Amino acid sequence: MRNLSIVFILILLAPAEAAKVFQHKYTLWAPTEVLLYPQNLEIDDFSPGSLCFEIASQQKSMRGTACRIAGALQRDTLSATYFSWLAQNLDPQSTVASLAARNPAVQNYFNLLDDRFLIFIHQSQDTTWTVLFAGPRALIDPESMQNSPIAMHYKTEIKTAAELNKFIQQTYFKQKTTPRLSPQQKLFADTAPDEQYNISTELDVWAALSYGKTTAQIPLTPDNWYARKRASRMGNYRVIADSSSSWNILEDQSDLFAIRSGFTWRDFVGAELFLLYSQHPVKLDTKDKVYQELKNWSFDRYEVGITAHFVHNRKLGARLLWQPTAFIGFHYSFFHEKIALNPGQTGSDAYHRRLKFMPFYKGTIFGLSQRLIWNRTIAIEARTGLNNRSRSQTQNPSMDEVNEPTIIGASTLDWFISTALEYHWTWEDL
Amino acid sequence: MFKKFLSTFFLFLLLSACSHQQNWLVRHPKAPQSPQKHEIGLVDLGDRWIAIRTSWFGQQLKLTSGQIHDSLGTQLQNTINSQLKSAFPQHKFLTEDIYELFAPTESFRLDSNIFAKLRLPAQGQKLDSVPQLMFIVHELTIGPDIDPSFFFDHTQGGEIIKRKVQSISAIALWTLWDNHSQTNLITGVSDTELLYDYSLPLKPQIDTLLHQLVQNMNRELAPSGSF
């Protein structure tokens, strides 16, 4: 216990502080070349070889890494001026942009680093500062990181070369490595088209099975917009306060099944055929005794139509593609009645004069979807959107026509969300 | 009522999603909260001004095209210099000769789309006989109905529409420089606009405009409002 407390007091007396000022992402090419720019370094036994030994011994793929002192930079007046300026401005508040080299000659040196790294090491009092520069090929975002340090750290209480080597290895060379490119591969990478242009295929055809939910309420809209529709009940097989929306008559919340098949041309635009199916029981006024004869009454809704869609592609990995999509289309909507009476019943007059929907409705559908395609074959898709149906007007009303009676279900709107499993077939060129 | 509120809210969401918030000021974390309280080296504006639609200025000031440069330039220089002098009580006025010690023109990134061309002192070279802080107006643009994004945002652009002048605007690109550490503390673009009154002479209106501009710069230099 006493030993523990002594250790604790020692920790309190000598806090070795290590902190990150900033660190941005970079590609760690392996094996790489590390240039060192030590300035004001008071560790005698520090050598590039010992650092490389530490780097190589900690990660197998880094074997063969070469370290050397950046003599050309130290001898050059302009870069030496920049680095002495940098030494003056080592501050925990520093930002990437504020430490950028502004002199074109120094910028040129940084560009020549290519896939190599440069570490600036500076000691002032008991604090050791390390600043990492990466060549343009190692930068993830060359646009905003060029000519700037990519990472900066400091640590107090570094007394030996072993500690410094370990600190540098742990902070900068611990991450996952990428095999270094040969000169030919570099040339190929430089002249290859942008990957975002490279991923398009001529034709992508798919078939999908989908399951989801449909409901009258659109998200983020208040409940009271739907309260009246949802509370509505139908009496005597056809007595209803308002029949313009089907949701006054039918249960709006339902499972939604779909079969879809479509194509995308050049990963940009395409079309899709779909068949939607959902089941909607009739909302009966249970106080009405006429329904005692009724066993069940519901409507199956079938919607068949076509959508056009626009696709954006983003490659998430070597085999993984993300496609956010916007779609809009139209459909024909049919209500198929399912009604059954209790055994022995023949049906009342009201039963025989019960409410009927129109033979079909015309509707529009639009929404957003996204799919994750693996290996250009299997995909999971999620979509959401709005779907409406209105009356099937086949001719323009004449001038002297009287006001038409309300058409049942002529303004029915619902929101849907669904997920699907898809299989894709692709053709690179036709 | 609720529907109306909701639709307005959605419209706001849509508009805010579409609009890109432009960043017209880059501030170093070490920048002082109220630089006006320190001694500041003020660099003379000199010839670093631009007038857009000089013919319109000539028309209003009743000057020929040859006279505009001298007349307008003298007014802009004198007004902005005197306004800045009064904004920074502890100033040391530096002539334009100090520009010879600066690094060549370079591109400075304010935002992903906004770039400015400016000249600053070199890194690692401390200027002699200059206070720690130095305030440089790199460029002053004056003209009718102009917008800073027209000059600095590379995604914007097009032609200056020559319609009947509604207002006069002034845009300044400026930097607060730390001479000791040779760092760029604040670089910003300030702009102001004044509805042009045809019944009054132009000259005092330009003075008012530049007064507003310097006030804006002051406000951006000291965000806490403690100047």
Image (cartoon, rainbow, N blue to C red):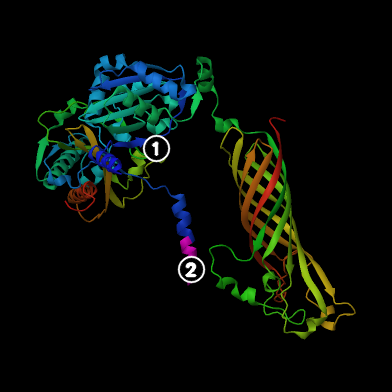
User: Closest to the observer: B201 or A209?
Assistant: A209
Mark number for residue B39? Answer: none
Q: Split into 4 quadrants, where in the image is the C terminus of chain A?
A: top right
Residue B212 vs A59, above or below: the answer is: below
- Per the image, is B225 magenta? no
Q: Of circles 1 and 2, which is in front?
A: 2
- Residue at 49% across / 60% down in the picture? B10
- Per the image, is B5 magenta? yes
Q: Is residue A402 left or right of residue A131?
A: right
Q: Amino acid at mark 2?
A: Lys
The image shows residue A364 at horizontal and vertical percentages of 67, 58
Q: Is residue A430 left or right of residue A268?
A: right
User: Which chain hosts label 1?
Assistant: B
Q: Earlier in the sequence, mark 1 or mark 2?
A: 2
Mark number for residue B4? Answer: 2
Q: Amino acid at mark 1?
A: His
Residue A1 vs A180, above or below: the answer is: below
Q: Quadrant of residue B176?
A: top left
Kindly identify which residue carries mark 1. Answer: B154
**Would you say the magenta stretch is mainly helix, strand or loop?**
helix
User: Closest to the observer: A206 or A168?
Assistant: A168
Does dot 1 land on a helix, a strand or a loop?
loop
Does dot 2 land on a helix, a strand or a loop?
helix
Q: Is residue A359 left or right of residue B95?
A: right
Question: Mark 1 and mark 2: span between their CA atoms?
Answer: 38 Å
Q: Which residues are the magenta region? A: B1-9
- Residue at 14% across / 38% down in the picture? B42
Q: Residues within 10 Å of mark 2 (few under 14, many from 20)?
A: few
User: Closest to the observer: B74 or A79?
Assistant: A79
Task: For the residues labelled 1 and 2, say whether their Cβ atoms are less than 8 Å apart.
Answer: no
